[in-house]
Image (cartoon, helix red, strand yellow):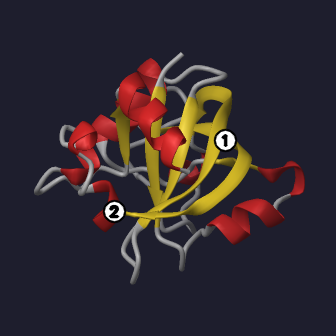
Amino acid sequence: MRYWLMKSEPYEFSIDDFAALPKQTIAWEGVRNYQSRNFMRNQMNIGDQVFFYHSCCKDPGIMGIATVSKPAYPDATQFNPDSKYFDPKASLNNPRWFNVELTLVQRTRLIPIKELRHYAKLYRMRVLQTGNRLSITPIDPAEWQFILSIL
């Protein structure tokens, strides 16, 4: 099993939106960064655990826990010319973008990035590194366990 942090801007898709979904499950579509795509396509498996993270907001931080409930498959938005995620270079025979499906496990208290920065055990977390803008990053198992202990 692997552990991940996946960011979402709450004005696009929030923890409340996630909780309101039927079966609390969503296709994590619209990722247009190759490294994040590769994480989903090549490394994520059913049962992997995810910290759901609000970004680009007043109080960015971890808001919940989800699990990967369906492995990577082509992101349908790349083929839809009316989608903001349309990619004219993608084709059904050669898709460029993939998504996984996530299911919400639980909401958590907000663990703000400011708080995460205070823990020496988390100093290597990618989300805390200067210049990190990836929407999906791996989490070390020890970091995962430590964060669970402070929930």
Determine crowd level at label 2: few under 14, some 14-19, many 20+ residues with C-alpha closer than 10 A: few
Contact, CB < 8 Å: mark 2 with mark 1? no
The residue to which callout 2 is attached is 115
Q: Which mark is residue 51?
A: none
Of labels 2 and 1, earlier in sequence is 1
Residue 127 position within the rendered picture, expressed as x and y whole percent measured from the top left: 27, 50
- Return the residue nearer the eye: 60 or 115: 115
Determine crowd level at label 1: few under 14, some 14-19, many 20+ residues with C-alpha closer than 10 A: many
- Return the residue nearer the eye: 74 or 42: 42
The residue to which callout 1 is attached is 102
Q: Which of the 4 quarters of the picture holds residue 13?
A: bottom right
What's the residue at 47%, 31% (across, down)?
145
Left or right for 126, reference 40: left
Q: Which of the 4 quarters of the picture holds residue 121?
A: top left
Name the residue type under label 2.
Glu
Q: Quadrant of the N terminus?
A: top right
* Mark 2–mark 1 distance (CA, rounded to whole Å): 26 Å
Of helix, strand and loop, which one carries label 2? Answer: helix
